[in-house]
Amino acid sequence: MNAAPLLQVQDLSCRLGGRMVLEGIELTVTAGEVLGLIGANGAGKSTLLRCLLGLQRRSSGRVLVDGCAIEDHDGPALARRMAWVPQPKGAAMGMTVVEAVALGRLPHRGTPGAADDERVVAASLHALQLGALALRPVAELSGGERQRVLIARALAQQARLLLFDEPTSDLDLRHQLATLQRIRALAHDEGVGAVVVMHDLALAARFCDRLLLLAGGRTLAQGPWPVVLTPEHLRQAYGVEALVAETHGLPFVAPLRALQGVPVHV
Amino acid sequence: MAASLVVAPPQAADSTLPSSLHQQLLARQWRRIGLLLAALGLLALAVLLSLGLGSGSLTLARLAQLAQPGSLTETEWHVLTQLRLPRTAMALVCGAGLAMAGVALQGITRNPLVSPYTLGVSPAAAFGAALAILYGAAMVPGWGSVITVLAAFASAMVCAAVVLSLASVRSVSPVVLVLAGVGLTYLFAALTASVQFIASEQQLAAIVHWTFGSLNGRTWTEVAVAGSAWLLVLPVILAQAPALNALAGGGDEVARALGFAVTRVRISVTLAAVFSAAAIVSFTGVIGFVGLVAPHIARLLIGGDHRWLLPFSAVAGALLVLTADLIGRLAFAPVVVPVGIVVAFIGVPLFLHLLLTRRHEIGA
């Protein structure tokens, strides 16, 4: 049943404007797993996500989706396997919620799956509680609602691998929780593999099965949160002195003070 | 509670779905069909009025007798077939073509302020025409207007080439494209102003008249050339409707992540849009507002799905230009106000009204 991992990255490097922004990245995501990508601003989290999607050209290394290099999938076939949830931005251009979610069905054009378009769109809207907003213009929605539209679009793609770029950045506490629980449920109940770029370390530790900590474009640590979130790693990656604890079975990270003279990669 | 999504088995999903969504989508589909038919009905009415109204003895009542052979006088027949029909046809081609080019360009740049005019294509055409007039195109007997049109087209295509080469650079964002268009608009406006500065009084009048944008004296040949240019690009643009949805709804990177070859789409759509716009404005002169305002009106009425938006914009644009021309012909008859001016007078207040009252839906 479990053949190739959903996503495999081998020795990925990326040079941007003469600077190495990513170097020697290795990672694997299997079905049912949530991988959290963490690191300071400019550590290369978003660039890594864009490399995985093929939006950013890498200098070396391989990215395999379902055991096959992303260059060897044709565009729509890759989009049926890997979906991206970007941060909400840009003009809505008159699109309604249902139209925006239906964009996720575009990679299925001309495949037998296209017959299910309406049902899948409806199910995606339903899953994100967007049913009542279906015919509302996207431009009228709040930031959190727009975020949900983007997640619903990715669900409509029916991809087994989902890449989230800071999915909680625009959300209040309640919606942060709901979104992360949703991502976790997708992975644990539906066997989706997810890569999630995050800033909140406590939430990342709590909702991700594994964390990958980037610092200056390199992997500083990778594994379960107690291995990754050590005061020493946080000092190196973020240039802060931090307290890491576990209370009531929940991870807890408190930055105490910024350190002088520690190189922070911006 | 959690409906199975990713590998959703049909029964499970169906049982949890609100069937009202299906009803809503169905209702929306009928609404779209109704709107399209209503717009086509209005357009047919406008065509009828355009053929039956104006100076001369050919009236709507006389037009109604067309069914009986030989009922129209030779003059009336001439007015109908050689003046009003080509003029009406040109208005349709011009409105539909410019509006569709506007929708397509707004879609690929995900910017509601883009149009053939704002990308500099129309101002460039004006400069080409002005240059031709300055260098005495009118002196060449029989070929004056042909040379002017060719010069306008060549100049518009130079501008289009600049826009296109920018659009084909992968790392250039739509914002850069839009700002480059602003720059090109100023450049060609300045060039036209320089030509006007050194032109003789007679040439100046001809240049100014051309820049107004007018449907006066359009011939069947001109309609055929502009119409063919538009019909040529029509399937190209319509075929890209799904890609335009992805680009307008998510931008370049989302469209790429959805599997579209974005650079190729951008080049083919930009080429199709600016080519048809250049072909049209070369004959009509600068009619600036259609390509901007018709797509907005259409988007507000029919939504952002380009499979509907493209055809509906074409109808809306045709209706706008034809109505404007009709008003221009009748308001101060026998003086004919150039259609470019009337379009601006109708379009600008309409545009501002939409912008202020429904800006959220436009996405601005």
Image: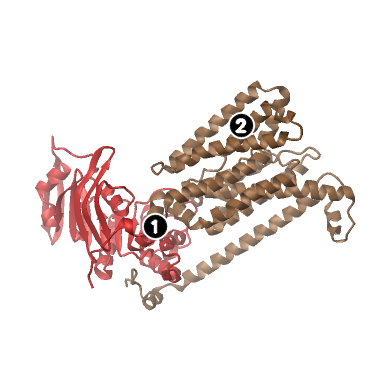
The quarter holding residue A156 reads bottom left
User: Residue A173, image x and y in percent?
Assistant: 27, 55
User: Residue B210, image x and y in percent?
Assistant: 68, 34
Residue B48 to residue B87: above or below? below
Q: How many marks?
A: 2
Judged left or right of residue A118, residue B71 is right
Classed neighbour count for the residue bearing mark 1: other residues with Cα under 10 Å, few (<14), some (14–19), many (≥20): many
Q: Residue at x 78, y 39 (%)?
A: B332
Q: Chain of mark 2?
A: B
What residue would you read off at disc 2? B127
Q: In the image shown, does B29 or B118 lie closer to the viewer? A: B118
Q: In the image shown, does B314 or B352 lie closer to the viewer? A: B314
What residue would you read off at disc 1? B258
Q: In the image shown, does A203 or A248 lie closer to the viewer? A: A203
Judged left or right of residue A79, residue B43 is right
Colour used to depict chain B in the structure image: brown
Q: Residue at x 54, y 65 (%)?
A: B28
Mark 2, secondary structure of its residue: helix
Q: Which chain is red?
A: A
Rendered image coloring scheme: by chain
**Residue type for callout 2:** Phe
Residue A240 to residue A151: above or below? above
User: Residue A189, image x and y in percent?
Assistant: 26, 70
Q: Chain of mark 1?
A: B
Q: CA distance from mark 1 to mark 2?
A: 41 Å
User: Residue B340, image x and y in percent?
Assistant: 67, 39
Quadrant in the picture for the N terminus of chain B: bottom left
Residue A34 to residue A17: above or below? below
Sequence-wise, the earlier of marks 1 and 2 is 2
